[in-house]
Image (cartoon, helix red, strand yellow):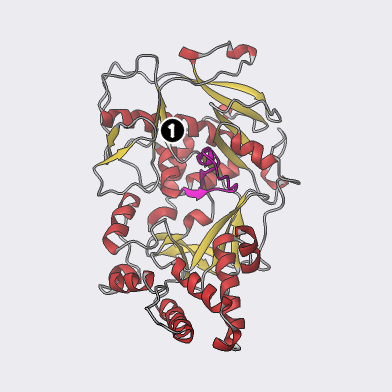
Amino acid sequence: MKRGFLNTAKANKAEAKLEPKQVIPGSRHAFFFDETIRDGDPEDGAIVQLSLFEFLLSFLHIGADSNEVESGNTGVRVPLCKKSEKLPSEFKLPKLNISFTDAGTENVNDHMAILTTIPPRGPNETWADSQDGWSECMFHGGYLKRALFSIPGFPTAVPKPPVVRHHIGPSAYGLGMFAAVDIEPGDLIVAERPLLVFPPYGFARWPKGGPTELSPAQTLQVTYMQQEERLKICVERMLPEARKKFFALFNSHLEDGSGPIFGIARTNAIKFAPVNEDSEKSHMYTSAAVFDAISRANHSCCPNARYTANASSFSLSLRALRSIKAGEQIFINYGVTSEPTAKRRSVLLPYGFSCTCALCTDPSSDALLTLILESLKTKPGQRIDQIINDSMNWVKVIEDAKMEHVVTYFLHLVRLVGCPLEYVGKARAIYEKKCDAWTMATHGMPYKAYIAVQK
C-alpha cells in the first residue's frame, strides 16, 4: 500500500506552500469561531461559542462501494466525492477566525474547536529538546484535554523497546515497516507520539441562512476545504522537523478536493482514543492521529501487529500479534477484521489499493472465517473434554491461517486458561502466555490486568 510512500518532490512542494512567518506559538490555545456569530471582539481575547448549523461528516474508512454517506447530526445524505466538484464562482468560504488564550486555562468552551500542543512547548524549545516530540492537536471542546491533564504526571515518557525493532524501507506498496530483529508475540515494536491529532469527522460552518444554493456534493467540498484550513494552522504550529515528517507521508486523496494537508491526514490517520469514556460524550474523547512511523505500516487483513493508545504518555504502541522474523514486513489492519472479502475490499478502496494478503487471495478464506467465527458454539450433549479439545484444535487452525487478530482466537484461549487443569495439563502455561501476548498487543496490558479492568 502507498500509505507510507515517500515522494520527496511532492512533499517539498506541499511544504513550500506554508509560510513560516505564520507559525503560531505552540504554547497557546487557538479557538476557531465564525465571525458572523461572535459574541465578543477577538481583539479583546473573547472566547466565542460556535452555535451555527454544524455539518458533521465521517471521513475515515468510508466504503467506496457506497453511493452516499449519512452526516453525523443532520439526517442529510451526502454523495461521496471521488473528484472535486466546482463551486459557484460567487461562493466565498466563511472567514476562519482564531482567538487565543493561555494554554493552561481550564475555562475551555466545549462547543469550540481548540488547538493545543502536547506536551506544552516553550517558545525557545527545539526538536532536540525532547526525546518524544510534540503533538499538534485539534480537539472538539475541552473534554479530552481536561481528562488527559487530570492524569498524575501527564505526560509521562513514551515507552521504548529494549532494542530498535523496526525500520522503514521499500516494499511492494511504496514504503513499509519491517522487523529489524526477531520479535515475539506481545513484544513492543515501536511507540510514538502523533505528529497531528484531530477530530475523526469533518464539519462545515455557514453564515446564518445556510448555503441553500450548494448541492450535497459541493457541500462536501466545502467541508474538505474548511478542514484543510483548520489543519493548516495545526501544521504551521509544528516545528520544522515535525512538519517535514508530515509532508513526507503519502497522499492518496489528490483528486477529491481534500487539499494537501487534509489529504495526507485522511490517508495516514489512525484511530486514537487514549481516554476511554463510556458516556454520551464518548465521541469527544476519540480522535484521528497521524504518526511518523506507525502511519507507514501497511495493511493486511491478517496483520501481525496491533496498536493501542496510552493515555499517560499520549502515545500509540505497536506490538506483535505473532512471531515476526527479522526482515519480515510488519502489517496492521485498517479497521476491517472479520468481514467477508468483498466487504473488506470495498472499505479499503478509498486508500487507493487492492489488498493481496493471504485472506484476500484465497478463495476458501471466507468459508474458513465463517467457521472460525462460529467455532465457539457447543453442540447439545457435548462433554467438557470434547469442548476443550475443540478449542485446542481451533487455536492451531487460527494460528496456521494467521488470523490471530480475530477475537474468537482470544476467546478460545480464555476457555483453555479457565478450564480445569486436568483437561490441558502442562499446556496451560503455553495458553496463558498466548493470552498475555494477545492482550498486550490489543489492550496494552497482561491478561490478568485486562480481566481485572473488565471487572
SS at badge 1: helix
Quadrant of the rendered structure where residue 14 is? top left
Q: Label 1 is placed on what type of residue?
A: Glu
Image coordinates for residue 96, horizontal then vertical, percent = 48, 21
Q: Quadrant of the C terminus?
A: bottom right
User: Measured along the vertical axis of the image, is residue 101 above or below residue 192?
Assistant: above
Residue shown at the point (60%, 77%) measured from the top left: 432
Image coordinates for residue 431, horizontal then vertical, percent = 56, 79
User: Measured along the vertical axis of the image, is residue 291 above or below residue 1?
Assistant: above
Residue 181 appears left or right of 221:
right
User: Measured along the vertical axis of the image, is residue 407 above or below residue 82?
Assistant: below
Image coordinates for residue 84, horizontal then vertical, percent = 28, 34
Magenta-drawn stretch contains 284: yes
Query: Taking the image as drawn, is residue 323 in sight?
Result: no
Q: Which residues are magenta?
A: 269-289
Image coordinates for residue 320, horizontal then vertical, percent = 54, 68
Residue shown at the point (42%, 74%) measured from the top left: 402
Single out the residue that lies furthest toward the right. 153
Residue shown at the point (42%, 35%) measured from the top left: 202
Residue with the mark numbered 1: 228
* Residue closest to the eye, 111 or 1: 111
Q: Quadrant of the N terminus?
A: bottom left
